[in-house]
Amino acid sequence: MAKRETCLWIFPIRWGVFVISFIIAGVSAALIGATFLHKNPMMIHLAVIHSVLPWVYIIVLAVTGVIGLFGTIAAIAGNHGFMVFYKIAVWLMTFFLVIIWQIIVFILALVNRSKTTEACNKANPATSQDYNSTENASVSFQGYTTTLLGVNMGDTYGVANCDQAVQAGIIGVAVLLFVGGIVTTWFAFGVNKCARSLDTNYMGSHARTARWDDNLDQLQSAYARDKKNAPQYPLKDLNKTSKFSRGLMKLKLKK
């Protein structure tokens, strides 16, 4: 009986892990690049909360990218030890880098909403509401100097003023927290399945039954082949009296 392939979404489990790990690594690298090019909307919120948070954010992205890259290597190699290590890393990433980090950022962004709006207004003064200007406005706030995303407000959020932009940013963080937590938890369970599928010492009840059925089928086929190929010998009727037996019986009768 053929063993059914375990799937992750529409992919076989191992290649599903490869695709999603590659996406994680690619998105992390893209966000790091956008951050250093001042094109990442998250930076204005983090910079206003504390000057250290943007660097923490970059470290989080770097760690996430390394984890995703390791996952692609583990999926290609198909090594059980690599996949077990990746499973642990994904669960740590899910708990600390996605859930805990996003909760902290969301709470701080919500508490410091007025500060973020103030910094945005300084970068985009009311006397210059031309958001189509190609000049980048800089702002110094709590000892941290930053360019407001390196882009225009309307280009960043698609809204007209700083209040709406900050509100959109907080909503975006909340959506990332909710969706990111669900997706990464689902993916972590998928990596668990992949690690089990690569473990030759792990075998569940269904796998044991399937292997037992396969062994019985192979044994039955072997018996059938042996029976077919075995030499044929003439069989004697054991109930038929032989000449020797008849002779002995005659001697007994004569006595």
Image (spheres, grey):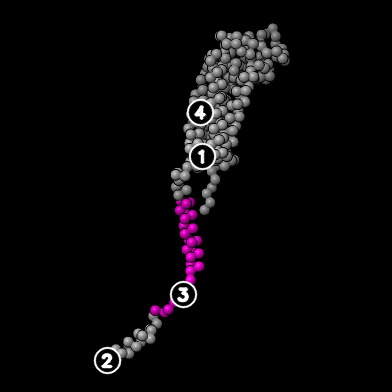
Q: Which is closer to the viewer, label 4 or label 1?
A: 1
The residue located at (66%, 16%) in the rendering is 150
Residue 235 within the segment the image draws in magenta: yes
Residue density around tag 4, few if under 14, some if 14–19, many if 20 or more, within 10 Å: many
- The part of the chain drawn in magenta is 209-238
Mark before the other along the chain sequence, 4 or 1: 1
Mark before the other along the chain sequence, 3 or 4: 4
Three-letter amino acid code at the position of disc 2: Lys
Q: Residue 79's mark?
A: 1
Three-letter amino acid code at the position of disc 3: Tyr
Mark before the other along the chain sequence, 3 or 1: 1
Q: Which is closer to the viewer, label 2 or label 4?
A: 2
What percent of the width, then of the height, locates residue 35? 61, 20
**Circle 4 residue:** 93
Q: Gap between marks 1 and 2, in whole Å?
A: 88 Å
Is 89 or 97 nearer to us in this picture?
A: 89
What percent of the width, then of the height, locates residue 111? 53, 15
What percent of the width, then of the height, locates residue 216? 46, 57
Q: Gap between marks 3 and 4, in whole Å?
A: 72 Å
Q: Gap between marks 3 and 1, in whole Å?
A: 54 Å
**Circle 3 residue:** 233
Q: Gap between marks 4 and 1, in whole Å?
A: 21 Å
Three-letter amino acid code at the position of disc 4: Met
| Vertical relation: 21 (above or below) 224 | above
Is 119 or 150 nearer to us in this picture?
A: 150
| Vertical relation: 195 (above or below) 243 | above
